[in-house]
Image: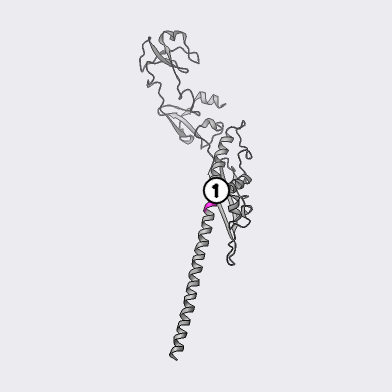
Amino acid sequence: MAKRENDSFKGSVTVEASLALFLLLMFFICMMQFYMILNLEIRVQSALEQTADSQAAYAAIQGYHDEDGSLSYIQCGLNYMYAKSNVIRILGKEYLDTSWIKGGSGGLHFERSSFLKDGETLTLVVSYKIEIPIFLIPKISVIQKAHRRIWIGADSSQMDNSKGSARRKVYVTRNGSVYHLYADCSYIDVKLRAVSAKNLDFLRSDDGSIYYACECCHPAKNGTVYITSYGNRYHAVKNCSAIERDVIQIGEAEIGEKHICSKCQKRAGG
């Protein structure tokens, strides 16, 4: 009788041990599957981010070189077909075709992506299904996104200055009363020219003005002096305070009561 009870106990322990081992094995299998799914999603997201970066950068470069200033979606690769091919290239077609993505590389869908609907942002959206080959687990639907704003530039000369965009940047001097649309405006991007003071009587600025002595640096009318193409003063030193411009960039909303520079306005067609 005692022997029968002992055999029964050993049998129950064996069954429990087998069940525990089975559950432990299942746990490790689930963890491995979770890791593989996570690794797949990370790799897809990385490829998506790289593709969004390249499209945003190329859109800016290509777009700003178009003669009419518009963006060519096809030339800039701003379409989901290019996005898909680039993601496949980064990940590798062989890797995708042997992955758990249903349909392999052909199972990646980018039709939900949007390109420059507001004129400056793109959103890449890829959707696919993960099909786990072990057990009867339902297919997992996955949607991943990468959002980018194309580089619209800090130099407003690369933008449409005829449009009052709140995002446009302008240039001002700290104590100036005007704002400038272009960083290379001659009023703030001063080009100095060294000349002999003896020739000042024969020199004129671009607007026809005669050069007079600067009231700040008090140059003598001999030796070398410095003049600018615009303006009517000659200077003794290059770093005269009347020449230097402490230029800062601000948003158009910060202009306040400053008025537009006449040269910039003319250049912008205003």
- 44 is within the stretch colored magenta: yes
- Tell me: residue 32, above or below residue 234: below
- Toward the viewer: 257 or 123? 123
Q: Is residue 210 left or right of residue 164?
A: left
Q: Against 109, is 233 above or below?
A: above
- Above or below — where is 115 with respect to 215? below
Task: Pick the quarter of the image with the C terminus.
Answer: top right
- Does the stretch in magenta take in 249? no
Q: Where's residue 136, x and y in %?
A: 59, 67
Give the SS element for disc 1. Answer: helix
Is the stretch drawn in magenta largely helix, strand or loop? Answer: helix
What's the residue at 47%, 76% (across, down)?
Answer: 17
**Amino acid type for the residue under numbered disc 1:** Ala
Q: Residues within 10 Å of mark 1 (few under 14, many from 20)?
A: many
Observer-nearest of 209 and 106? 106
Residue denoted by label 1: 47
User: How many marks can you see?
Assistant: 1
Q: Quadrant of the N terminus?
A: bottom left
Looking at this view, name the residue that lies furthest to the front. Answer: 3
What's the coloring here? one colour
Read off the magenta span: 42-46
The x and y percentages for residue 98 are 60, 56
Q: Quadrant of residue 101?
A: bottom right
Is 104 positioned to the left or the right of 222 in the image?
Answer: right
Horizontal and vertical percent position of residue 97: 61, 54
Q: Residue 109: where, in percent of width, then height?
A: 62, 52
